[in-house]
Image (spheres, rainbow, N blue to C red):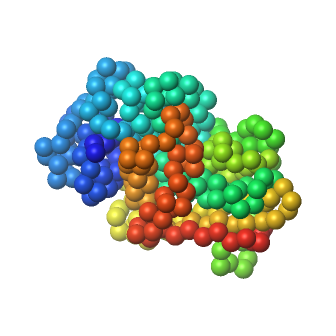
Amino acid sequence: MKIAIYGANGYQGRLVLAEATRRGLDVVLVGRDGTRLRGAATAAGLSDADVRPAALDGRDALVAAFREADAVINCAGPFTPTGAAVVRAAIAAGRHYVDTAGEQPYIKEVFDTFGAEAEAAGVTVVPAANDACVPGDLIAGLLAERLGPLEEIAGTHVITGGGGPSRGSLRSVIESMDIIKAGGLVYDDGDWHVGLPARHTSIVLPGGSAAIPVAKFPLPEVVTIPRHVQVRHVEGLVEAALSARLSIPIDPEIIAGLPEGPTEEARRTQRFTYVIDAVAADGRRARGVVEGPDTYGTTAVIAVESARRLVTDPAKPGVLAPAQAYDPVGFLGSLLPHGIRWTIEEGMSGS
Ligand SMILES: NC(=O)c1ccc[n+]([C@@H]2O[C@H](COP(=O)([O-])OP(=O)(O)OC[C@H]3O[C@@H](n4cnc5c(N)ncnc54)[C@H](OP(=O)(O)O)[C@@H]3O)[C@@H](O)[C@H]2O)c1
């Protein structure tokens, strides 16, 4: 199997490249700068790798590069200004597409814009194949199977350690500043809204005793979950301190002077806990939890697994949420060897 990685020379792209290679997959490195792509290939021990320079406005070169592969993983962010061109080229090439995006408005735009085009081309598009959205969305599907129609889903992300975000993540934060300041989209009564207040302001984490303050945040799962779960209200939350920190714009020049991303050693110290609290229409409750190390390393594992599954076990064409594209238990089980564990408990209430 051959995977085209767009933005293969970036911080996340190189981790995806390493993960694809570790699994014995062939790769095509695609991006706007041939020299930087070649450098990434050489650093990964792939000096003979297929390198295809293709800028976003070079549609023919992009399509030709993607035709060399069975599926495309797009790691080039910020996605808001760049992602649509890559999705369009993957569809034109007839190749399944996933990306590592976390930018909520971009992810919604992919669903709103490309559904019919992807269906007509027989291509499956799964945006936000990252550490958080895939497990959160899959677990939301499992919670709905147990509880039936839902009144509410609240997704909460808590991350400790890890050495901070990559430059690319910080640039994506700048690109999403308006929606971050607004607290993100909230799904309510059949549509997504900006400006609705969060229902929750605190959460008790698994194994914790005290409630910690949380605030509304534009999590990708808020866009994907209502596509397959019958639910009246979905909101995304992060620790209030993190939300406040990310709401202060950082000067792009300061970002340019920062390290490219956390070191491998720092990534090893990182732990994430993603909690999905569901309340059924009849008041019953259940909590899904996914916990693991190293958000960037986990994103690489999940993006490669997402693309691989679209090739070996095709889903229906169109733009799909993770739970529409993958068998939830099978996918979540594949993450266990990478230290990513998930649980579902009924009768739990986090706040
Ligand atoms: N959970 C999550 O939500 C999650 C997790 C992981 C990563 N991500 C996202 O992944 C993205 C990548 O992060 P990163 O740390 O890898 O960033 P990075 O190191 O800055 O790499 C960005 C990559 O995108 C390419 N790129 C940027 N603008 C481009 C343009 N206009 N045309 C063509 N290529 C362009 C860059 O190419 P050049 O080198 O040629 O500039 C580079 O290959 C970010 O958006 C980040 O938020 C999200």
Question: Can you tell which quarter of the image residue 60 is in?
Answer: top left
At 52% from the left edge and 70% from the top edge, which residue is drawn? 341
Q: Looking at the image, is 304 positioned above or below residue 94?
A: below
Q: Position of residue 205 (x, y in %)?
A: 67, 71
At 38% from the left edge and 47% from the top edge, which residue is drawn? 312
Query: Is 135 left, or right, of 61 in this rendering?
Result: right
Taking depth in this image into account, of 109 and 252 the one nearest to the observer is 109
Quadrant holding the C terminus: bottom right
Q: Looking at the image, is 120 positioned above or below residue 250?
A: above
Taking depth in this image into account, of 90 and 208 the one nearest to the observer is 90
Q: Looking at the image, is 138 positioned above or below residue 168?
A: below
Q: Position of residue 27 (x, y in %)?
A: 26, 44
List the single residue furthest toward the left.
48
List the single residue furthest toward the right.
282
At 19% from the left edge and 51% from the top edge, which residue is drawn? 43
Q: Position of residue 94 (x, y in %)?
A: 39, 28
Taking depth in this image into account, of 57 and 120 the one nearest to the observer is 120
Question: Can you tell which quarter of the image residue 177 is in?
Answer: top right
Question: Can you tell which quarter of the image residue 39 is in?
Answer: top left
User: From where the camera sits, is residue 249 visible?
Assistant: no
Query: Is 288 left, or right, of 47 in this rendering?
Result: right
User: From where the camera sits, is residue 23 visible?
Assistant: yes
At 73% from the left edge and 70% from the top edge, which residue is drawn? 346
Quadrant holding the N terminus: top left
Q: How many marks?
A: 0
Q: Position of residue 234 (x, y in %)?
A: 73, 49
Taking depth in this image into account, of 248 and 94 the one nearest to the observer is 94
